[in-house]
């Protein structure tokens, strides 16, 4: 690629300047808590209220700065944090997946999958694994692009084309996966909490978007292959740079460990199939259905146990797990990356519960729904509007969970008021939040991607990355919107027991 002069004062520079001026999410949520308190005081003094469309009760704004409000905050400060549902789920999932990563299972599996496929299937394999990389959390953003670049170079293809395919898959397609991952656990916990603002008995589980995300995984893989062939490869041209470092194949020990892990995986699946398929299977519900049974309701714990056990099997056979004491030690190591998240959760939990206490979620939802209905801005136009809104906000604030903590208390109740399910509101958010990850200048993994690319092209810069990621972002967004429209039109189930409409 020829060297390009970066244009100053353009839209991308504006986005970067604004994004860099945003405070740390912890400070941002402290400000949001303060702003929320002031707003609740003003609206309470004005006597703002709405009629709950579900119960017919009058809902008034609760003043956080009143005597009762301050008393509530001080007496619930610790319990708000202790009862924050997503925290325990995220910690448990990270311990299990982080352990599998620490013993080398995930890295070996990715290397084997990417470096062992024929040339014609290489791009699809990179994209498919990258999209499913959210199972391994953000580790895939580093592992998949680097391995993809080496694999492309090994078969005579442009290494940067492979790197970009891996980077697009692990970022723009981050929210999709064949099995529920940490993202599903985290987002559904917030969705469940905010749905209860409208209906205290409503339950949202981590599998509520499962069916939609399974289809999304295959769709994005196909769209990504097409984008790579039509837009990326022609733009990059023939690779004439330095030879790529040859990526070593997996060792004999790693191969034995991977084989043992594969056998264990099949046995694990077979066990739960045997406990579920029979009509009187113990994993079925009291009514005899799979939907209401232990398999679905306990899917997250089942996955946690799987990642721990399969990691143990791999580690023992491959020799990366020397003694039993290594298991808790490796789990503890895997949690070190979440220390910042735990600190952030403390203030986020306060904001969520403060928002619920004020009743502003209900009031905003009801008034917004009435306004949209009065303006005739409902249905698919409204849904697409919110997807695009999430895309734009993601350019300035990259933390997907932090944005959902802000959007969910407003979007979920409002969508419920309009007749849409919380699971569908979550889908809308996930589409918008995921697509623009790859073109966000303030994304923390951009420096890593640029460093990888400079191995093959020393002139590759921020502008190059954004320009080459834009086709992926736009094609993923367009195809995802079309898929979402099809889901609405045919009213397909989003997941077990989860529908588009209430």
Image (tube, helix red, strand yellow):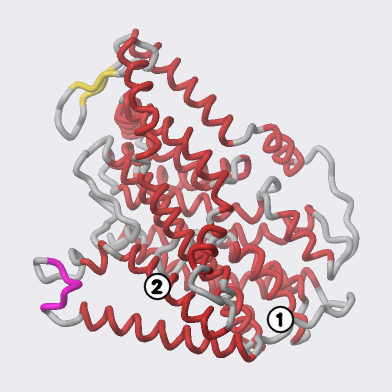
Mark 2 crowdedness (10 Å alpha carbons): few <14, some 14-19, many ≥20: some
Dot 1 falls on a residue whose secondary structure is helix
Q: Can residue 374 be seen in this view?
A: no
* Residue of label 1: 151
The overriding secondary structure of the stretch rendered in magenta is: loop
Q: Is residue 73 visible?
A: yes
Dot 2 falls on a residue whose secondary structure is helix
Between 465 and 317, the one lying in front of the other is 317
Instruction: Give the left or right position of residue 221, taking residue 56 as reference.
Output: right
Numbered disc in front, either 1 or 2:
2
Question: If the image is split into quadrants, where does the N terminus sit?
Answer: bottom right
Residue at screen point 20% across, 81% down: 277
* Residue of label 2: 306
| Quadrant in the picture for residue 209 | bottom left
Disc ID at residue 258: none
| Quadrant in the picture for residue 117 | bottom right
Between discs 1 and 2, the one toward the N terminus? 1
Per the rendered image, the range of residues in magenta is: 280-285
Measured in 3D between alpha carbons, the distance from the residue under mark 1 to the one under mark 2, in whole angstroms, is 29 Å
Number of numbered markers: 2
In x, y percent, where is residue 267? 35, 85
Residue at screen point 37% across, 33% down: 80
């Amino acid at each position: 690629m020829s060297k390009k002069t970066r244009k100053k004062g353009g839209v991308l520079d504006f986005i970067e300047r604004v994004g860099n001026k945003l405070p740390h999410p912890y400070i941002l949520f402290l400000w949001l808590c303060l702003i929320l308190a002031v707003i609740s005081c003003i609206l309470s003094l004005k006597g703002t209220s709405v009629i709950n469309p579900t119960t017919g009760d009058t809902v008034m704004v609760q003043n956080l700065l009143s005597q009762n409000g301050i008393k509530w905050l001080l007496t619930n400060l610790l319990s708000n944090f202790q009862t924050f549902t997503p925290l325990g789920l995220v910690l448990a999932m990270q311990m299990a997946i982080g352990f599998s990563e620490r013993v080398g299972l995930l890295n070996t599996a990715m290397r084997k999958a990417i470096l062992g496929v024929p040339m014609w299937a290489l791009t699809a394999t990179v994209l498919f694994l990258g999209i499913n990389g959210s199972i391994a959390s953000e580790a895939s953003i580093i592992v998949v692009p680097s391995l993809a670049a080496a694999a492309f170079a090994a078969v005579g293809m442009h290494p940067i084309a492979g790197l970009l395919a891996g980077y697009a898959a692990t970022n723009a397609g981050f929210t999709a996966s064949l099995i529920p991952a940490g993202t599903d656990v985290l987002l559904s916990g917030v969705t469940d909490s905010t749905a209860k603002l409208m209906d205290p008995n409503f339950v949202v589980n981590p599998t509520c978007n499962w069916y939609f995300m399974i289809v999304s995984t295959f769709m994005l893989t196909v769209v990504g292959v097409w984008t790579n062939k039509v837009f990326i490869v022609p733009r990059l041209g023939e690779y004439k740079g330095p030879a790529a470092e040859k990526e070593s194949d997996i060792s004999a020990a790693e191969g034995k460990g991977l084989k043992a892990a594969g056998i264990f995986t099949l046995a694990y699946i077979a066990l739960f199939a045997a406990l579920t398929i029979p009509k009187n299977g113990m994993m079925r519900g009291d009514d005899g259905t799979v939907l209401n049974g232990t398999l679905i309701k306990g899917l997250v714990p089942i996955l946690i146990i799987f990642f721990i056990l399969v990691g143990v099997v791999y580690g023992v056979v491959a020799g990366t797990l020397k003694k039993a004491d290594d298991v808790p030690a490796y789990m503890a190591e895997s949690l070190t990356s979440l220390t910042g998240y735990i600190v952030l959760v403390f203030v986020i939990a306060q904001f969520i519960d403060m928002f619920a206490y004020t009743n502003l979620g209900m009031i905003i939802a009801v008034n917004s729904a009435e306004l949209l209905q009065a303006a005739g801005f409902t249905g698919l136009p409204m849904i697409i509007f919110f997807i695009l809104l999430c895309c734009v906000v993601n350019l300035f604030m990259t933390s997907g969970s932090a944005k959902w903590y802000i959007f969910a208390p407003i979007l979920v109740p409002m969508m419920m008021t309009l007749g849409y399910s919380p699971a569908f509101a979550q889908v809308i958010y996930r589409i918008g939040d995921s697509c623009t990850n790859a073109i966000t200048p303030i994304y923390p993994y951009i420096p890593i991607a640029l460093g990888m690319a400079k191995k093959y092209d020393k002139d590759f810069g921020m502008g190059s990355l954004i320009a080459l990621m834009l086709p992926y972002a736009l094609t993923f967004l367009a195809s995802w919107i079309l898929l979402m429209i099809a889901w609405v039109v045919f009213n397909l189930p989003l997941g077990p027991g989860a529908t588009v409409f209430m």
